[in-house]
Image: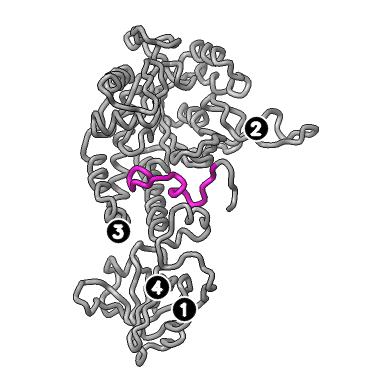
Amino acid sequence: MLVAEISKIFKNKHEEGSEVHVHGWVKSTRDGGKISFIEVNDGSSVLNLQIVAKVDSTEGYNEVIKNARTGSSILATGVIKKSTKGDGQIELLASKVEILKNADEDYPLQKKEHSMEFLRDNAHLRARTKTISAIMRVRSKLAYAIHKFFQDNGFIWVAAPIITANDAEGAGEGFTIAQDSDNPFFDKTASLTVSGQLNAEAYAQAFKKVYTFGPTFRAEKSHTNRHASEFWMVEPEIAFINLAQLQVVIETFIKTIVKEVYEECKDEFNFFAKDKPFIIERINQIIDKPFMRVDYAKGIEILAEAVKNGVKFEDSDIFFGKDLGSEHERYLCEKVFNCPIFLQNFPMEIKAFYMKENDETKTYTGSDLRGVSGKTVAANDLLVPGVGEIVGGSQREDSYDKIMQRVKDLGMDISSIQWYVDLRKYGYFSSAGFGLGFERLIMYILDVENIRDTIPFPRTGGSLKF
């Protein structure tokens, strides 16, 4: 007899009247005496399947109804049918039910509301809740959509190294790998990668279009809802394109993968939309509305004017050269433009060493420079309502002399990235790429408030329980 997945039952992949086996875990039981009901989930759907058991026709009735606890695994055999309530719901009329493994009485996830903090403290069990299971199914489908987009468009996937000697961002936030001082494993300081970008650039010079998609690490002791010490990054790199062309790629990419995951995960989105109906509008906005392009200098003008008009930010000191916070980013894309925006052409001093210096027409000449040169780089951040930045990208500096000077100005150790700088000597005409914070995109499309709830076992400063 066929072992059926609950998701396929609800999608009418099995005809009414079909006899099937269903494995799953008990979410609740209702003892009605002669007729009882068991809510079961097998992880394939956010929806529970109702098992209808009758005392006079269901083998194992008394054993299961009297003894099966929440969290227990069971096997039910029966016929798929529509509910007798006439509500169109699908249920299973059981001919046999069997407890495969009963849960102990101290099973933490009982049939009641649990706080997200409680669930994080029980990360080994929280995937059994509707909220986390829905997030993780969307995460899985989104990961597939990302790979599919790039593979369908001729990109080569590159497995960027996890252990590295370079700090791609120049921020010194890597996790250093301990070595025996008397007999070191590597010939230089090694750390966990903060980005696969530099390695992707090398491969883009051979394949033209490449991408990395894997875990990255930041040793930031930040406890905001947007930061984690281990998270996943999507980092494509394309040779022979500029920033404007890159923005077309980013916009097409975001629209395509969001549309695909929305169509594949309608039940999950509808589950979240019960409490947050605006997320459906948000999805449609991403898919249907063009992303706007706004210069950083213009954004600064808008924010400065907002402060003059009484808008209160936690940090209201606005000037050219300021590294904008989430509150500023969200104000621009939520209150001013009400759509995703590319904030572009940033001051050189607040961006990474590898970003291409713009020509003089992009040099800012205002008076309030606060110690920056006024030079800008061909970089953009994609800002979205509800989260702020989810994508950062740039055209890369192709001049060997300029990037070497930038490394010297920043006091960076050239020895670990000389190979990267040397690419400019070997046919490097141009290149551009971006990084997408995978978990931040999940936060955005589902309106999840904390990044720790978008990754199976979150890593942040302090605790390392799991």
Residues at marks 2 and 1, CA–CA distance in whole angstroms: 52 Å
Q: Is residue 425 depicted above or below 194 in this figure?
A: above
Q: Amino acid at mark 3?
A: Asp
Instruction: Judge depth for marks 3 and 1 and give the one in front.
Output: 1
Instruction: Judge depth for marks 4 and 2 and give the one in front.
Output: 4
Residues at marks 4 and 3, CA–CA distance in whole angstroms: 21 Å
Q: Upstream in the sequence, badge 3 or badge 2?
A: 2
Magenta region, residue range = 442-460
Q: Nearer the viewer, residue 123 or 409?
A: 123
Q: Upstream in the sequence, badge 3 or badge 1?
A: 1
Q: Amino acid at mark 1?
A: Ala
Give percent across and percent down for residue 460.
54, 42
For mark 1, what is the residue? 68
Q: Quadrant of residue 411?
A: top right
Give percent across and percent down for residue 122.
52, 57
Please say if the residues under marks 3 and 1 sit with CB atoms less than 8 Å apart. no
For mark 2, what is the residue? 190
For mark 4, what is the residue? 28
For mark 3, what is the residue? 267
Residue at the image point whose x is 50% and y is 77% from the top: 100
Residue at the image point whose x is 43% and y is 9% from the top: 373
Q: Secondary structure at mark 2?
A: loop
Q: Quadrant of the N terminus?
A: bottom left
Residue at the image point whose x is 38% and y is 35% from the top: 390
